[in-house]
Amino acid sequence: FIIGENHIVTAEHVINDCGSVAVWQGHTELETVVLAKDAPTDLAILKTNKPIKPAARLRMLPPIEMGEMAVNFGFPLYGTLSAGAIVTSGIVNALTGFEDDPNQFQYDAATQFGNSGGPVLDRYGNVIGVVSAKLDDSKAQLVNFAVNPTMLENLLKSSNVHWSSASTDEILDIPEIAQKASEFTV
C-alpha cells in the first residue's frame, strides 16, 4: 500500500530476494526499487521513480485496543478468487502475535494467501497494521497476524520516509473503508 509521496509498504517475505518489484495501481504499472527490508519484523519499503497518490494514513494514537474493528483489504489469491480487491472485517483479538510476539497483533478478519503486505485498517480507514502471517486453517481458523504500527513507524523513520498521521474524526462504514483503501492499495 502507498505510504508517503512515492513509497509502498509490503511484507518482507513477499519481496525477499527481489532487487526491483513491479506493482500495479489500477491499470498503471509502477516500477520500484527495494528501499528497506527488515526480516525480523517482516516489513519492506519500496520506492517508485515518480510520485503516487493518495497515500494511506498511519495510526499511532490512540494505541490499538483488543476488540476494535480490523478490516483487511487486498488481493488474495489473485485471479483465482477475483482480479479485484477483496475486503473482510473482524476485530483485534490480541495485542501480541504468534508466541506473544510484541511486534505483531492478532486479528480475525479472513486472510488468504496473497493478503501479505496489505493494510489492516481501523474504523476510520487508517492503517493499524501490515498483514504478515496466518495459522494453518486446518489447525485454527481466522488466526491472523499483522505487524503493529510501531514497527512500521520505526522502519519508516530509519528510511527517511515521510507519512501522514491518522485522522480519527469520522467513523466509516465498511464500504467507505473499502473505497478509501482501494485508492491507496496496490
Image (cartoon, helix red, strand yellow):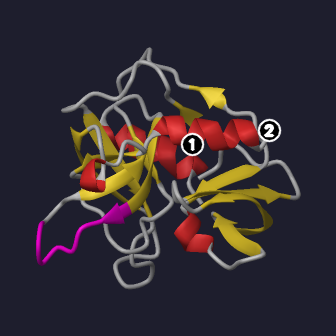
Residue 3 location, quadrant:
top right
Q: Which residue is mark 2?
A: 160
Q: Amino acid at mark 2?
A: Asn
Q: Percent position (x, y) of residue 94?
A: 22, 41
* Residue stretch in magenta: 133-140
User: Which disc, if any, is residue 174?
Assistant: none
Pointer 2 local density, CA inside 10 Å: few below 14, some 14–19, many at least 20: few
- What type is the residue that disc 1 sits on? Leu
- For marks 2 and 1, the one nearer the N-term is 1
- Residue 135, position as x, y percentages in the image: 24, 68
As drawn, is 117 to the left or to the right of 178?
Answer: right
User: Residue at point 32% right, 70% down?
Assistant: 112
x and y percentages locating residue 52 in the rendered image = 76, 49
Quarter-of-image position of residue 49: bottom right
Residue at 46% x, 76% y: name it.
83
Q: Is residue 76 left or right of residue 46?
A: left
Where does label 1 land, which residue? 152
Secondary structure under tag 2 reads: loop
Observer able to see residue 112: yes
User: Camera-side residue: 36 or 61?
Assistant: 36
In the image, 169 versus 61, the foreground residue is 61
In the image, 50 versus 180, the foreground residue is: 50
Q: Is residue 178 magenta?
A: no
Q: In terms of secondary structure, what is the magenta stretch mainly?
A: loop
